[in-house]
Every structure is written in C-alpha cells, then in structure tokens.
Image: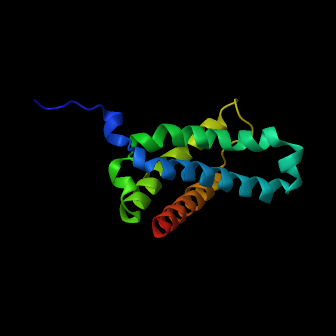
Amino acid sequence: MATSTSFLEERLDAGALPLAVGDILVIFLLVTVGVVQHNGVSYLSANPVGWVLTAVPFIIAWALVAPLLGAYSPGAAESAKSAVPLAIRSWLVAAILGAVIRWTPLFEGGAEPVFIAVMLVLGSLALGVWRTVYFRIV
C-alpha cells in the first residue's frame, strides 16, 4: 500500500530549518540596510516599529511563497547547488508579493518600480550568498 503525503510534507524538510532561520535574518538585514540608507542609523532606534514594519511585508511574502516553491524541500537541505536556485526562485515571487503587500494601505512606503527592482536583485544576491556560505561552513 502506498503512503500518502501532503503537498507541504513534500515541500518541507526539518533539515532545512537552519536555512529558514538564515533566510529570514538575511531578508530582515536586507531591509535594515535599505532603511539605514534612506533614513540613517538613528532611525533604527528612533522608530523601531517603522523599521520592523518595513520588513513585515517581505517576511510575510517569504513565509507564504518559500515553502510552496520548495525553498525548504528535502533537496534544498542537501547542497548549495540545489538550495541557491530554490531560494532565488522563491525570492523573485516573494519580493513582488512583498511589494504588493507594501503597496496596500496597510503599510507605508509604497512600491515604486525601482524599489522592486532593487529588492529583486539585492535579495536574490543576498540569499544566494548566504546559502552558498552556509553550505561551505556546514
């Protein structure tokens, strides 16, 4: 008798948990660098809620998209060769979704095309570098 597994069971591997934690930290760091670039370092302590709310749309989008597109699938936890493309593929969708969420009245900041382009490129680069470094260390 064949065993039945759910879609998410095929997409989530406990061995990918360190990748998930690192990915969230990298996305938060990416947003933090942007916040500092636009508002200065003092903004981080002067407006911590605004700082965190800048990251929230992208964290939400990543949490929704990454598992569905396989960023934490069994293959992702095996090597950089598989993990990096899965992260980048997930980020391309998550960054656009994050920008859409940010564009709604729920969040300040909007989503100008140049902002989206920067998030797509720098996020892909940051996640790719993080995952490559992770597999070189582990």
Residue lying at 73% horizontally and 53% vertically, measured from the top left: 32
Coloration mode? rainbow
134 sits left or right of 2 in the view: right
Above or below 49: residue 137? below
User: Can residue 91 be seen?
Assistant: no
Image quadrant occupied by the N terminus: top left
Q: How many marks?
A: 0
Residue lying at 61% horizontally and 36% vertically, measured from the top left: 101
Residue 57's spot in the image, x, y percent? 63, 39
User: Can residue 52 be seen?
Assistant: yes
Residue sticking out furthest to the left: 1
Residue 61's spot in the image, x, y percent? 55, 40
25 sits left or right of 70 in the view: right
Above or below 11: residue 38? below
Residue sticking out furthest to the bottom: 136
Residue 51's spot in the image, x, y percent? 77, 44
40 sits left or right of 77 in the view: right
Residue 66's spot in the image, x, y percent? 46, 44
> Which picture quadrant has residue 49?
top right
46 sits left or right of 38 in the view: right
> Which picture quadrant has residue 96?
top right
Residue lying at 49% horizontally and 37% vertically, measured from the top left: 64
